[in-house]
Image: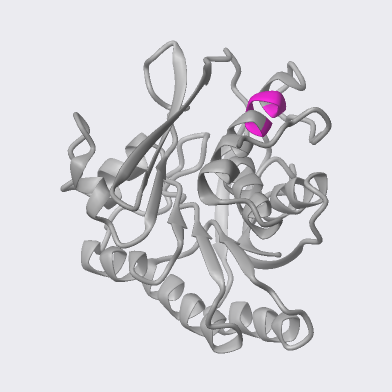
């Protein structure tokens, strides 16, 4: 499996967190860096974007040796770079499943993307398997989305998992919109300020898909994993442990 994401020195998010999640699921992970960040789990200072040519050079070096079927994409400079990365991935394996975790701002509040090209977002959704936005990202990326019933989300060309961790309910509910159906995954809200939960969840789902699970099973199992991850430590950095997580059937 391949992660294409930013480098977080605290290892709570980004490439390092993705690799730890992959390995906790028993899947070999390799990574491409899209940005260097000056941050820790408490504070975000600055982002230094990696040049697109250097991103593609990293990909070429890895994909010329490894056969990759599932790719998780995180922090990317803009939708143009994202589109070019996706195009390059398909030159190596047209059957690649791409899971996009759109990151619009850091958990500490720093905004990465102010202006969103919604036409490009729509084109990207036609080329990927799954997008995993939280509520704020959903409203920004898909302004036509109806947050009362979600019907418009059922018409997206890719599957969409709306992450509920940033909502106001006492239940942490994630909702999967896929093949004109809506599936909810609920768990009790856990009072915690964990760093990098979005990265961990999308990486867990990607790992589950790579292991052969169906999408609903992968999301359910990923939901259970992130709940255990949040409860794993009182600190803002969680611990990875796959033991005890059961597959949904």
Q: Is residue 164 left or right of residue 239?
A: left
User: Which color scheme does this rendered protein use?
Assistant: one colour
Where residue 30 sits in the image (x, y, percent)? Answer: 76, 66
Question: Looking at the picture, does residue 93 appear above or below residue 204?
Answer: below
Looking at the picture, does residue 54 appear above or below residue 211? below
At 71% across and 56% down in the image, what residue appears? Answer: 211
Is residue 38 in the magenta section? no
Residue under the image location 22 percent in, 33 percent down:
147
Residue at 74% x, 46% y: name it. Answer: 21
Q: Nearer the viewer, residue 3 or 76?
A: 3
Q: Position of residue 236 (x, y in %)?
A: 68, 25
Q: Residue 236: in sight, yes or no?
A: no
| Number of numbered discs | 0
By secondary structure, the bulk of the magenta-drawn segment is best described as: helix
Horizontal side of residue 212 vs 91, given as left or right: right
**Where in the figure is residue 87, as x and y percent of width and height?**
47, 82
**In the rendered structure, which segment of residues is drawn in magenta?**
225-229
Q: Looking at the rendering, which quadrant does residue 162 occupy?
A: top left
Vertical side of 103 occupied by 221: above or below: above
Camera-nearest residue between 67 and 121: 67
Q: Quadrant of the N terminus?
A: bottom right
Residue 10, image x and y in percent?
74, 42
Quadrant (top left/top right/bottom left/bottom right) for the C terminus:
top right
Q: Note whether 77 is above or below 110 in the view shown.
A: below
- Report whether residue 116 is seen: yes
**Residue at figure coordinates x 74%, y 85% from the top left:** 61
Write down the quadrant of residue 45 in the picture.
top right
């Amino acid at each position: 499996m391949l992660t294409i994401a930013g480098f977080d020195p605290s290892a709570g998010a980004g490439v390092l967190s993705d690799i730890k999640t992959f390995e906790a699921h028993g899947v070999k992970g390799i990574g491409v860096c899209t940005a260097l960040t000056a941050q820790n789990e408490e504070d975000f200072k600055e982002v230094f974007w990696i040049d697109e040519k250097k991103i593609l050079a990293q990909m070429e070096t890895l994909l010329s040796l490894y056969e990759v079927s599932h790719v998780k994409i995180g922090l990317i400079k803009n939708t143009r770079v994202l589109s070019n990365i996706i195009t390059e991935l398909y030159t190596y394996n047209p059957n690649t499943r791409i899971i996009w975790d759109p990151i619009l701002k850091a958990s500490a509040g720093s905004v990465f993307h102010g202006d969103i090209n919604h036409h490009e977002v729509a084109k990207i959704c036609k080329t990927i398997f799954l997008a995993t936005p939280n509520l704020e990202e959903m409203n920004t990326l898909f302004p036509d989305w109806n947050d009362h019933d979600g019907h418009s989300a059922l018409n997206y060309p890719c599957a969409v998992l709306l992450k509920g961790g940033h909502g106001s309910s006492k239940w942490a509910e994630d909702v999967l919109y896929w093949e004109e159906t809506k599936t909810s995954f609920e768990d009790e809200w856990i009072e915690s300020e964990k760093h990098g939960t979005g990265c961990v969840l999308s990486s867990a789902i990607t790992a589950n898909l790579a292991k052969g699970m169906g999408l609903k099973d992968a999301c359910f199992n990923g939901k259970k994993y992130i709940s255990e991850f949040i409860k794993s430590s009182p600190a803002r950095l969680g611990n990875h442990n796959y033991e005890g997580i059961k597959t949904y059937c």
